[in-house]
Amino acid sequence: MATLVLLNGPPASGKSTLAVRLVETRPLALNLDIDVIRGLLGAWIDLPVDAGLAARALAISMARTHLGAGLDVVVPQFLARVGFIEELDQLAVDCGVRFAEVALMLDRRTAVEAFNERSKTPQTQSHVDARALVERAGSEDAIGAMYDAFTQMLERRPNAHREAVEVGDIDGTLARIER
C-alpha cells in the first residue's frame, strides 16, 4: 500500500534532507517539496502567500496522481496551521493510502540557531529563499515565532508522530522515522 508522508518541522530541522533520503530507498517515490514548486512560479517572492497557496494546490494534484498509481509521496513542509495537513490527510483517505504525519522536534533555541547557521552558507535555492522570506518578515525573532506557532499547532494534532531531531544526526533521525 502506498504511503503519503508529511515531514513537518521548524525551518532547518532536516525536513528536506530527510525527504531526499526517504525517497532514495523507495522506487519511484516522489519527493514533493512545495518550496521547490513555489520557486518555479514567476515572481513568487513578491506574492509569497499567493505563491504558497498555488504551490500547495499543485502539490495536491501531483500527489493525487502519484498516489493513484500506487506510489509513495513524501512532503517536506513547515506547517504551523492545520489546513494543509487536513487536506493531505483527506487526500490519503480519498486515494486509499496510509497517511504518516511526522513532526520533527527540537527545542526552540536549537531551531533558531540551526536556521541562522544554515542561512550563513545556504546549500540550496530553497535555503536562499527561506532566508529572504525571513528577512522580509522584518521580525528579529521570526524563526522563534514560527517555532512557537508550530508547537502550538501540534497541540491540535495528537496523532502526529513526534520525532526528536539531533542536529547533525540525520542517519539516526531517519532510522527512527523508518521504524
Image (cartoon, rainbow, N blue to C red):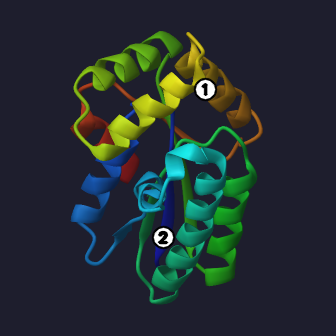
In the displayed structure, 110 sits above or below 14; it is above
Task: Tell me if residue 179 can be seen.
Answer: no
Q: Which mark is residue 3?
A: 2
For the point 40% across and 39% down, the residue is 129
Label drawn at residue 146: 1
Quick one: 25 or 149, which is closer to the camera? 149
Amino acid on which the number 1 mark rests in the picture: Met
SS for callout 2 = strand
Q: Do the residues labelled 1 and 2 touch (CB within 8 Å)?
A: no
Up the image or down, 168 lies above or below 98; here it is: above
Q: Distance between the residues labelled 1 and 2?
A: 27 Å
Q: Nearer the viewer, mark 1 or mark 2?
A: 1
Q: Which residue is drawn at 45% across and 86% down?
A: 70
At x 52%, y 87%, the residue is 68
Residue at the far bottom in the pictured view: 69
Q: Where is residue 177 in the image (x, y as percent from the top left)?
A: 39, 47
